[in-house]
Amino acid sequence: MFDFDREISRAGSSSVKYDGRRAYFGTEDVMPLWVADMDFAAPEAVTKALAARAAHPIYGYTMYPDSIYDSLIAWLKKRHGWTVEREWIVLCPGVVPSLHAAAMAFAEPGQGVIVQPPVYFPFFSCVTNTGRSVVRNPLIERNGRYAIDFDHLEEVAASAKLLLFCSPHNPVGRVWTQAELERLLDIARRHSLVVFADEIHADLVYPGIDHTPLATLAGPEDAVITAVAPSKTFNIPGLGLSALIVPNAGHRAALHRVFELLHVSASNPFSVAAFEAAYREGEPWLEALLQYLTKTRNTVREFLRVRLPKIKLIEPEGTYLLWLDCRGLDMSDQELKTFFVVHSKVGMNPGTVFGEGGSGFMRMNIGAPRQTIMKALQSIEQALKARGADHG
């Protein structure tokens, strides 16, 4: 029914992932497994909704209809058991702009904002770009599994105003347990921290794993703001529309003030149409996608175990982004970059861009036809064999 093996050329479509290869890697001759969008056609319902809207020949200023809120409320209830009120929802252009808005709304210039590296790099830039101070609470990696350093978080929480929390976590793939979330909430509560939970990958979790929205564990006294979007779930990030779930009226007012200051207004008619169609009709596509990604993840795991044992997979519980431990290759970060781009011709994100703890790692995007991922793995294997012969 859904053909995720279909190869669709994206060259010449102004795709960052493909047409931006030369700017990022210095060459176009790499298989692009970096930017976090997928090489799969979006759900047919989305394409039909966009075509229907395009058929109306006027593309004027666009408001958010009640139906778009209803679609998100129904989705969160069905998929996550989360009852959200209409007035809690703040629609906005994307999660990264929302990160900047949160830094501006909940911390003054110079005040501390906690990030938990290695983490999605805009978590750092949204703090530094707005003149706030980055407070690092590095994740702990033990035997191929990451955890939050709660003792250290307790220490730094007193000197910060805001915690930027990635759940599920990009790039390490953790889906945090209820016990971990409750402990984090307890620390935030005692230190009056606002928690911005980036849950953009919430729908992308593997079988046997459950994602718990942080806000579902929070009480009325807790300051939790949640970012969600159909962009990763349904592969429509280029349409630029996300939502913040903000139960506290004061927090909503603070965010609205920042958005007004930045003149962030209603979105375009196509993003509105796609957002609603995805949440209303995209679930069967998502279920098929999750099955496909699970098989691809398992295929990569087995390939590394048998044929590339010096590269270790950090077992992902969520996201289509794999965190690869390449420290066994005994290369510097610059050598890793050169090896993968020049010799393997596989374009991945260097772990160093994700901050402390990223050295020696690479992030691989498996949101592509499985034959593409296999081709990349085989290319890495051949390059390593050639390197071994050269160093023999």
Image (spheres, rainbow, N blue to C red):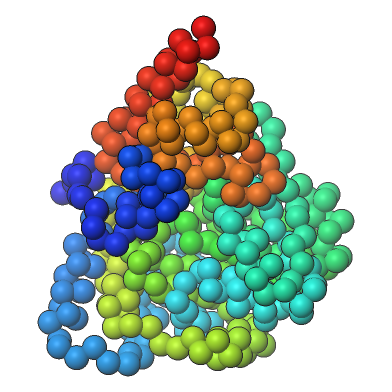
* Picture layout, residue 3 above or below residue 102: above
Q: Position of residue 310 (x, y in %)?
A: 54, 20
Q: Position of residue 241 (x, y in %)?
A: 40, 74
Q: Nearer the viewer, residue 329 or 178?
A: 329
* Picture layout, residue 251 above or below residue 298: below
In the picture as drawn, the residue positioned furthest to the left comes out as 55
Instruction: Residue at 33%, 40% (x, y): give it.
Output: 29
In the picture as drawn, the residue positioned furthest to the top comes out as 392
The answer to whether residue 253 shows anywhere in this view is yes
- Horizontal arrangement in the rendering, residue 9 relative to residue 31 (left or right): left
Q: Quadrant of residue 192?
A: bottom right
- Horizontal arrangement in the rendering, residue 311 relative to residue 292 (left or right): right
Instruction: Residue at 26%, 34% (x, y): give it.
Output: 371
* Picture layout, residue 39 above or below residue 29: below
Q: Nearer the viewer, residue 343 or 152?
A: 343
Instruction: Residue at 16%, 74% (x, y): give it.
Output: 51
The answer to whether residue 300 shows anywhere in this view is no
Instruction: Residue at 63%, 68% (x, y): give it.
Output: 126
Q: Position of residue 107 (x, y in %)?
A: 74, 76
Q: Position of residue 77 (x, y in %)?
A: 44, 68
* Picture layout, residue 343 above or below residue 204: above
* Count of residue discs: 0
Q: Nearer the viewer, residue 300 or 21?
A: 21
- Horizontal arrangement in the rendering, residue 5 relative to residue 313 (left or right): left
Q: Quadrant of residue 37?
A: bottom left
